[in-house]
Image (tube, coloured by chain):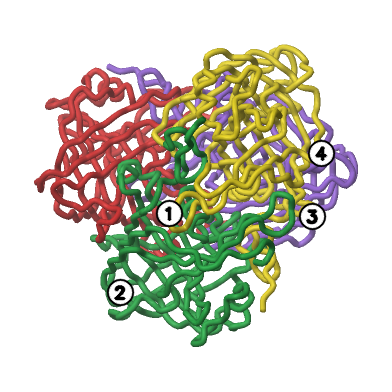
Chain colours: A red, B purple, C yellow, D green
Amino acid sequence: MTQMNGFFFPRTASGAASLIPSPPWYYSGDLLTVEYRTDPDRVAELLPAPLELAAEDPGAVALIWADWQSCSSSREELLDPVRSQYKEAFVVVRCSFEGRTYSRCVYIWVDKDFAIARGMHQGYPKKLGQMWQTRPHAFPQASPQIGPGGRFGATLAAADRRLAEAVVTLREESDTNGFVNGHPMAHHRVYPDIAGQGDAYAELIESGASAFQGGQAWRGDAELRLFEAPTEELARLEVDEVIGGYFRQVGVEWNGGRSLAHLSGGSL
Amino acid sequence: MTQMNGFFFPRTASGAASLIPSPPWYYSGDLLTVEYRTDPDRVAELLPAPLELAAEDPGAVALIWADWQSCSSSREELLDPVRSQYKEAFVVVRCSFEGRTYSRCVYIWVDKDFAIARGMHQGYPKKLGQMWQTRPHAFPQASPQIGPGGRFGATLAAADRRLAEAVVTLREESDTNGFVNGHPMAHHRVYPDIAGQGDAYAELIESGASAFQGGQAWRGDAELRLFEAPTEELARLEVDEVIGGYFRQVGVEWNGGRSLAHLSGGSL
Amino acid sequence: MTQMNGFFFPRTASGAASLIPSPPWYYSGDLLTVEYRTDPDRVAELLPAPLELAAEDPGAVALIWADWQSCSSSREELLDPVRSQYKEAFVVVRCSFEGRTYSRCVYIWVDKDFAIARGMHQGYPKKLGQMWQTRPHAFPQASPQIGPGGRFGATLAAADRRLAEAVVTLREESDTNGFVNGHPMAHHRVYPDIAGQGDAYAELIESGASAFQGGQAWRGDAELRLFEAPTEELARLEVDEVIGGYFRQVGVEWNGGRSLAHLSGGSL
Amino acid sequence: MTQMNGFFFPRTASGAASLIPSPPWYYSGDLLTVEYRTDPDRVAELLPAPLELAAEDPGAVALIWADWQSCSSSREELLDPVRSQYKEAFVVVRCSFEGRTYSRCVYIWVDKDFAIARGMHQGYPKKLGQMWQTRPHAFPQASPQIGPGGRFGATLAAADRRLAEAVVTLREESDTNGFVNGHPMAHHRVYPDIAGQGDAYAELIESGASAFQGGQAWRGDAELRLFEAPTEELARLEVDEVIGGYFRQVGVEWNGGRSLAHLSGGSL
């Protein structure tokens, strides 16, 4: 009888083919964030029961671009960086569950399969997209500086359509990198029933960074444009009022989460 | 309380953002198949209990390239073909479960996210890859013909490494398109536990085409080369003896499957 | 003294690294064409002297999607189809030179480097883009048929922005595949001066297929939408009146052209 | 009569569609370099007359990966970074022309069309490839540090085949970033004749940075592996002896070059 190994599929005797290794997973990257307010009803549409709108500022949304390098404990991915680098853009709202405030990623696009698989595990609803964000660099010939007046652009596209564009102009140092993505994440993990009757599996989980380091955060002015697409609903989260733009470099470790609730089939 | 809709994530009030629509799913495409024999022990390594080696020709393997156009019942994807066309390469072995012979996809690569999501649902262990296969065409200036002497090449790469190359030279009409991929599929669907303790969910399911049309199958000679890669184990299924190569055009409908067994946590 | 070989760069002693082999080049593919009329002044803007507007129907434009398989005389690319298959979308107008009517490609996007290099040689102003067009297939599960009512979609994107979308619904057999792309091509080949003073080289050349086979052409109704982008001017060729849509499968051989005029530096 | 504008094709009345804007061009990026010695005869094979082998260390080769952000004088590309960021890997040797030593790029791969077009102008023989190189980052969770022991990997692939892999382990500060790529570049710019008789245009040009800033260079140990591919000759420059590995961050301005010689047709 074969003992199968591998954290994720495909599983094999050795586990070497697994699309992702076991946590912990490590990340170094740059975050470009735009926070804004939309109609709270539009946020509520994305919160299945028993989740509820956050009590305070319930229409707040964060659209975050991240330019990552990531690895497992072996760090071997860092020397074969096609397996290490990826970009993403994700949309975070807040919600309330059993009296506690959570962040929740409602849309996310990445550009590598290992990132999709990690998202499956963590409950991030990942699609493939094309993301670009301006990089800071030691030399200014073709780069903004991390400081007053530094301008960073970011774009998101999927299925050959541009979905979002942002420009953030840094103004000053900031105590925070925004507030919308500042709570533990409350995510669903679901498996539709193979026979087509609702979900065979549905679970609400909580997770967050197991360790975190952050550089000086900067805030400034932000412009954000969202575009319609036939298979996307990002533009439904209309930009009523921009709260601000942020830039921060971070180092993160992720090492699992905990189950909040197992939901009966079809309930999500 | 919000009623969430959408077959797959991300789920929303309308369901429009779901990465994939509900089945049935429809496919038109060309299959290029190489069947060969490897050491049955290498196949057994990929069969978790209670699956066992097939009784007959247990070391038979099919490596299949497919060039697909696909859609949902709405057929709207066909007019926005970035959402419809995809390529894949997959490796099929056979196994036995409760006395019945099944086919089983042990490795598979695709080039679109909707194909990954359909694979998650169906238990195909999909990764992203780059697949190419020679196309037949009405005019021969830069195309083989589907007939004696027609030569079709196919390649598979992932993470910037070539994993497999095949050339099939058609010789004659064939009653079959090979035998390895001819049974219902027995696949696992798994969700690793969010706290890191084995699997939170593991299920063995059966599925197959709910409707099928196939053109004249052709068989011929095949060459196949497999290459090593640090995160792949395809080359471990060494080519001991080529059985043959096949080409066939098919139309397929898929509309769900059935659960064979729910496995206790960590058992897979 | 080393004798360098190779039709194009990089040149080497053996010539094996050349991005493209010597002509003749061979093509098998499907063409989806939308012809329409725009303001002739917008066409004139794209015709450098001594080219002039065509005498008849000077505002006619063809936007053509092509799904190609291509090869050199060795046909070896067909068995390694990453080097053989590519997609393109191109915009053709007509013009007059020394009393003769020519077709002229004013914009074109492709998805492979060998196609860019062939375009450099032939005077096609190629950029990279993402092109998709619905494919006909022997089985209708996820495919239109080549016949009355058959609907084909096509899209073009570059730099993560959608530039054009078309839908063609076939109605009847047609004697032609349109008329705009039916003449020899009159193209410029230019090399800007390395010191920044106009062009070091500028030539007007004529070329066309050295051999051609075409299947039955079909015509029908067409919808076409063009979108703005900061580095593109396709949308400036506004759709005033759709002439029609066409579908045809073709086989083509290309084997060079002839020089029409060498232009003095900076004249283009 | 229309006045055409645009530095490169496609040219239009406004010039807005040009694949690249006029120089000067600006770059900020990270260079990872491996220098080694190969058989000088292999270098000589890549030097068309009147170029000759460099007098000193004629078999020296530099394989350089670069992770760039780039822009024109408008800097607008920086806010739409799909038009600004690109990666490349290139191979440099040295040569002698009229008694002066030049660097010469003999092979190069990039991942954007604007980079191909700039290369056409500058005489870099660019193909499309997939390049990855480890990035330094402020936080070490998934990043090497620029300092003793910092390990950087780099890979190059084209046409779904891996062509080169390197690992550089930094050891100490260095006065230079290597010596092979330290001279003005001597490049050819060629246009094959449209009628197939040798070259219609062939020019030897010299160019280099018009302004340059560099951070502290680091040197260390390097491993380099080159792989065969049917349309590449990089592996022919066999690694006989590794000289060293280097890492440096730079800012560069490029603003044209000068013509060294116009070559008669077919002479290159």
Q: How far, Cα to Cα, is label 2 from label 3?
A: 47 Å
Tell me the mark number nearer the camera, choosing from 3 and 1. Answer: 1
Question: How far apart, in angstroms, are the residues tagged by discs 3 and 1?
Answer: 40 Å
Image depth: mark 1 or mark 4 in front: 1
Look at 71% across and 59% down and name the residue there.
D198
Q: Which mark is residue D217?
A: 2
Q: Which of marks 1 and 4 is nearer the N terminus?
A: 1
Kindly identify which chain the residue marked by label 4 belongs to.
C
Placement of B232 over or under D38, stated as above or below: above
In the visual, does C64 lie left or right of D207?
Answer: right
Dots 1, 2 in contact, CB < 8 A: no
Marked residue chain, label 1 = C
**Residue B51 in the image, given as x and y percentages of width and height:** 62, 47
Residue A228 in percent (x, y) is at 38, 23
Q: Which of D112 and C132 is in front in this view?
A: D112
* Label 2 and label 3 in one chain: no
- Chain to which the residue tagged by mark 2 belongs: D
Name the residue rendered at 12%, 43% in the picture: A171
Identify the mark at residue C211; answer none if there is no mark. 4
Q: Name the spot of residue B87 as percent of width and height, x first.
A: 62, 40
In the drawing, does residue C28 fall left or right of residue D176? Answer: right
Q: Which mark is residue C66?
A: none
Could you say whether the residue bearing mark 2 is in a helix, strand or loop? strand
Residue at 53%, 47% in the rendered image: B127
Query: Disc 1 versus disc 4: distance between alpha carbons?
Result: 40 Å
Mark 1 = which residue?
C196
Q: Do labels 4 and 3 share a chain?
A: yes
Please rate how many residues cluster around mark 3, counting C-alpha atoms within 10 Å: few if below 14, some from 14 to 19, many from 20: few
